[in-house]
Image (cartoon, rainbow, N blue to C red):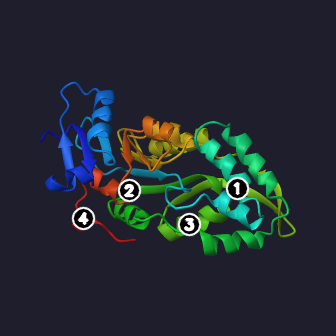
Amino acid sequence: MEAGGVRVASSSMLEFCGETLEIASPDNDENVLRAAIDAHFSPCDALLTREEPIVPRLFISDMDSTMIGQECIDELADFAGIKPQIAAITERAMQGELDFESALRERVLLLRDLSEQAIIECLDTRINPMPGAGTLVATLKSKGCRTVLVTGGFHHFADPIGQMLGFDRVVGNRLEIADGKLTGGLVGEITDSSVKRATLLAEMSDLGEGAVSLATGDGANDIPMLEAATYGIAYRAKPKARAAANGWIDRGDLTSVLQLLGIPREEWVVG
């Protein structure tokens, strides 16, 4: 069928026709397409495009609950015995109900006096890559794509995770440490939704006019980045983020992004 329109991958209702179904839409009414997909194929993975998707020159992604299966600050809070309190604030922030920076500073302040060793232990025992994350990054890099991990979380987690997954660059927030303990403060500029978007735009400017970009994220603070990307794909996302993106993953793992881009399995690089 015509390439323009919608690509739907890995839907249980589409198993009879293979992994991907392309639907042509004469009027390109995105709201109508979304409603039809949600009504008849949900849960599924979809990308709404006007042209055949191509491999992006830039891949930029959120970390927590996107490239990894956890929210690092919630897991770290467990070491301080306050996970429910912190997690409740995190959830409201990701839903877009709270100002991101204020919510971040409030949660970090509650972690004051937690040992830096707790961060290391948390990273080693609680944090795991999201299924398909390594393969997604490795495959895109094999095709010449630059990869950037940009997170509202912390460099203590993002730097080793970014290295493990093979990202070219990591952008995030820095916890203030003194005498081996968290002070309850942050150092430097806060990586919020505006910084995520600005990072994408700066990277795209370096790549030159017409370069295609891909962004993935799950929360409200990812929305400007998802909207600015050529392909903004919401991964198991909060409702506001899903509604803002032109693609979403509700059923598969992160390798579904490769399917939506039309990259055949024989070209995937397992990471």
Q: Is residue 124 above or below residue 138?
A: below
Q: Quadrant of residue 15?
A: bottom left
Q: Quadrant of residue 170?
A: bottom right
Element type where label 4 sits in the image: helix
Would you say 158 lies left or right of 251 here?
A: right
- Do labels 3 and 4 touch, CB within 8 Å? no
**Residue in the foreground of this view, choosing between 210 and 92:** 92
Disc 1 target residue: 84
Front: mark 3 or 1: 1
Mark 3 or mark 4, which has the lower sequence index? 3
What's the amino acid at mark 1? Pro
- Do labels 2 and 3 touch, CB within 8 Å? no
Disc 2 target residue: 145
What's the amino acid at mark 3? Ile
Q: CA distance from mark 1 to mark 2?
A: 39 Å
- Do labels 1 and 4 touch, CB within 8 Å? no
Q: Is residue 52 above or below residue 9?
A: above
Mark 1 or mark 2, which has the lower sequence index? 1
Disc 4 target residue: 265
Q: CA distance from mark 1 to mark 4?
A: 41 Å
Please provide percent x and percent y for residue 98: 67, 37
Q: CA distance from mark 3 to mark 4?
A: 25 Å
Please provide percent x and percent y for residue 226: 46, 41
Disc 3 target residue: 161
Name the residue at the left extreme.
1
What's the amino acid at mark 4? Arg
Residue placed at 32% from the left, 60% from the top?
143
Name the residue at the right extreme.
179
What crowding class fits label 2: few (fewer than 14 Cα within 10 Å), some (14-19), or many (20 or more)? many
Mark 3 or mark 1, which has the lower sequence index? 1
Please provide percent x and percent y for residue 3: 18, 41
**Residue in the foreground of this view, choosing between 113 and 150:** 113
